[in-house]
Image (spheres, rainbow, N blue to C red):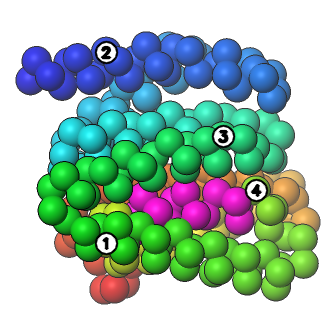
Amino acid sequence: MYSLVLVGGLGALCGWAIPAVVALWCQRPKHRFLIALVTASLFVLMVESVPGRMAQAAFCLLCLGLVVLTLIDLQTYRLPREISYTTLVLGVPMLTLSALVNGESFRIWGLVLGAVGALIAMGTLYLMSRGAMGDGDVRLSPLLGAFLGWLGLRAVVHGFFLGFILGAVAGVLLLILTKADRRTALPFGPFLAAGTLATIVLPPSALSVLSGGW
């Protein structure tokens, strides 16, 4: 319990600083306390859901990157490559070291295959969408694929599947509840982030139900 309090406190401090980082790309977000609370909660969830201290630190770093990217994407419909790439470059060595220390080399293969597979899949969808999907989503995909692949290749499928489902549901609700039409832009990054985080923290049984038995 004491360690979780420390982790939550660290998450709150990092979350408190996030608006200053977001302000480098767009307007400084409001509700700083809420951002700190969400980040603290995500840190605690990562520690509870991921095995190994080094891996837990890497997944907390992922949460920071995804919160920053989400806040920027909601305002600008952009996912800055600097954040996606930095999180990937810092996080992958931590995950690799964790796998080696714990004798779990299979996780390294999952990481690599997840990143490559996600990039190929999202790149293909980007080309097929003819501009409907942003290239920032493609640049984000190796980051999400690497972290999910470290957990297992099935997690990659679950994470992206849930992201697309959440995005589709949000799009339908937007059409029903507002004056939006099919040409209305909808930031996709937050849904990919939500699908990834849900896959990390939800039990396999719940993920199997949400993903139609996969």
Residue that label 2 marks: 9
Nearer the camera: disc 2 or disc 3: 3
Q: Which range is magenta?
A: 137-149
Callout 1, which amino acid? Gly
Going by the numbered disc 3, the residue's amino acid type is Ile
Q: Does residue 14 appear to the left or right of 74 in the view shown?
A: left
On the picture, is 30 further left or further right than 102? right
Q: Distance between the residues labelled 1 and 3?
A: 24 Å
Verify whether residue 144 appears in magenta. Answer: yes
Q: Mark 3 points at which residue?
A: 83
Q: How crowded is mark 2: few (under 14 residues within 10 Å), some or many (20 or more)?
A: some
Q: What residue type is labelled 4?
A: Gly
Q: Considering only vertical position in the picture, is 188 above or below 31?
A: below
Q: Earlier in the sequence, mark 4 or mark 3?
A: 3
Residue 147 part of the magenta-drawn span: yes
Give residue 152's mark.
1
**Disc 1 to disc 2, how far (Cα)?**
29 Å
Q: Residue 136 carries which label?
A: 4
Q: Determine the main secondary structure of the stretch shown in magenta.
A: helix
Give the secondary structure at mark 1: loop
CA–CA distance between discs 4 and 3?
A: 11 Å
Question: In the rendered view, would you say 147 is above or below 159?
Answer: above
